[in-house]
Image (cartoon, grey):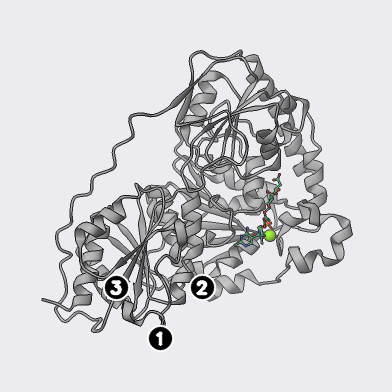
Amino acid sequence: MTTPSTALARTVVTALRGSGVCEVVLAPGSRNAPLSFALYDAAQAGGLRLHTRIDERTAGFLALGLGKVTGRPAAMVCTSGTAVANLLPAVVEAAHAGVPLVVVTADRPARLRGTGANQTTDQVGIFGAFAPTLDVTVADLDELLAFVRTHEWVRPVHLNVQLDDPLLPDDDGWDGGDVPTWGVTPEATDRDVAELAPGPRTVVVAGDDAGPPARQLAESAGWPLLAEPSSGCRTGDAAIRTYRLLLGTELGERVQRVVVFGHPTLSRPVARLLARDDVEVVSVRHRGTWSDRPFPVSGEHDGARVTVADDPAWLEEWQLVDRSVGRKLDRLLAAEPDLTPHEVAGAVSRALPARGLLVVGASNPVRDLDLMVAPYEVGGRRKVIANRGLAGIDGTTSTAIGAALGRPQSSRAIALVGDVTFLHDATGMFLGPREERPDLTIVVVNDDGGSIFATLEQGAPEHAERFDTLFGTPHGVDLASLCAAARVPHLRVDSLPELEQALASPNGGIEVVEARVRRDNRRELDEKIRALTP
Ligand SMILES: Cc1ncc(C[n+]2csc(CCOP(=O)(O)OP(=O)(O)O)c2C)c(N)n1
Ligand SMILES: C=C(O[C@H]1C=C[C@H](C(=O)CCC(=O)O)[C@@H](C(=O)O)[C@@H]1O)C(=O)O
Ligand SMILES: [Mg+2]
């Protein structure tokens, strides 16, 4: 018989494993020592893979990346106090994006709550509705299993484990114990699928995590597919590369109906289209909390299909114009004297082979990719993901490392991020010498600040005097030195051929390719691109 805290911790670990958790990210602490020892033993027994990270923010986003590619919850474990609060960014992103996640926090015993006991705060309910808390005091496996399994993998859950002294096991270890069988929740049978008739000039909008159903509808109906890079369906002949530019033309004005899948977040032209009162919007439900659409819809459904294909002339018109504007965009960029962020995104999208993994950061990189990705072939099994639940720039490096670790079958793993995004998660590169490292090329588009703001209202000349202080935030950080400090190989490139050469010859392991680009001409370049017409 071991100590009560060790017995409780082992029961919690058994419940995690009995709920399908195979990946656990641990941040070191003393109060969570019983959990740490139990996790170590379970990992040794072969029941799960254990990752250790010193920064809980990093741990949270690493677990998020693992969950995004496996579709099963990863768990993250930490000590009490501010460590718990550092998990909130990953929790709210997971909740809004519908990514499974289990948060396990060590806590002082309830008798100390409300006192000045060290490292003791109110951890029960700390994540609000984004991750309901079970305050764990007794080793009740059935209760734990019931709680962790009820969320059906579409939102995080929080186990707050009260652990009392003695915290360390007093036996020779644990064999991981017997693991309850974990059954996958059966697919709901009473799905509500909208039956759509041809006729209205229709486009299919595929936002983040829309998945193949959006493409399948567009292809069977013969409708243009406006798919964001992380939609999971930027594939096939119906996908329109320059849709965000075309929506501002006469073609876009003729749209009468939209079928929307996933979580569209990228562009104002799509947001404007979905808000138009002369356009009917049919919504296909997406995962994630707050799934109500922020625009009027004629109906919410679990799916959508057509009984007969529509007149092909409408799609053919979009395809013809798309090819024309795409050629003009490529010519415009090639005429620029310096390497442009859009060309970086284009090179990265071309370097992504079938079965490859691409993790793209918020801000301009995902938008540049949106303009530059020539739709991939169907069946290429490329996985392009982004943290679009809340479009944060935090934790992107960690998300990419987690996704690469969770998808070892990837033929190649690449991340495309901006410099501020990269700096925001610098600790994502701080892996201990015994930590598993994936092959991952992190392409950093370095324009020494946040260039997206230059393309927004605050980038107008009248704000120039305050712009860099408030929005541009130049930092002058030497990324080579930062990478050296983390012992991560770094290469700087200043031209498209250099970038293409770097992408064609990966080092292996985690590496950074820094593409230096301008930020001073971003607004002007953006305006020239937006002005392109068929
Ligand atoms: C956690 C978080 N903080 C702040 C923001 C606001 N924000 C959006 S984009 C951006 C700048 C990103 O700069 P960078 O990564 O260099 O990309 P660029 O715009 O230069 O392409 C900021 C601060 C955010 N989305 N998330
Ligand atoms: C920087 C933030 O997010 C803003 C980023 C871009 C959005 C945008 O309008 C891009 C323009 C386009 O692609 O068409 C902007 C928006 O949605 O209005 C976001 O607020 C931020 O800190 O919020
Ligand atoms: Mg930048």
Query: Label 3, on which residue?
Result: 36
Tell me the CA gap for discs 1 and 2.
32 Å
Asked if one can make out residue 10 in the rendered structure from this viewpoint, the answer is yes
Badge 2 local density, few (<14 within 10 Å), some, or many (20+)? Answer: some
Q: Residues within 10 Å of mark 1 (few under 14, many from 20)?
A: few
Percent position of residue 263, x then y: 55, 42
Q: Secondary structure at mark 3?
A: helix
Which residue in the protein does label 1 denote?
A: 118
Pointer 2 residue = 486
> Is 22 placed left or right of 299 in the picture?
left
Residue at image position (61%, 45%) is 265
Say which amino acid is labelled 1. Answer: Asn
Marks 3 and 1, the one that precedes in the sequence: 3
Say which mark, if any, is on residue 340.
none
- Dot 1 or dot 2, earlier in sequence: 1
Q: Quadrant of residue 323?
A: top right
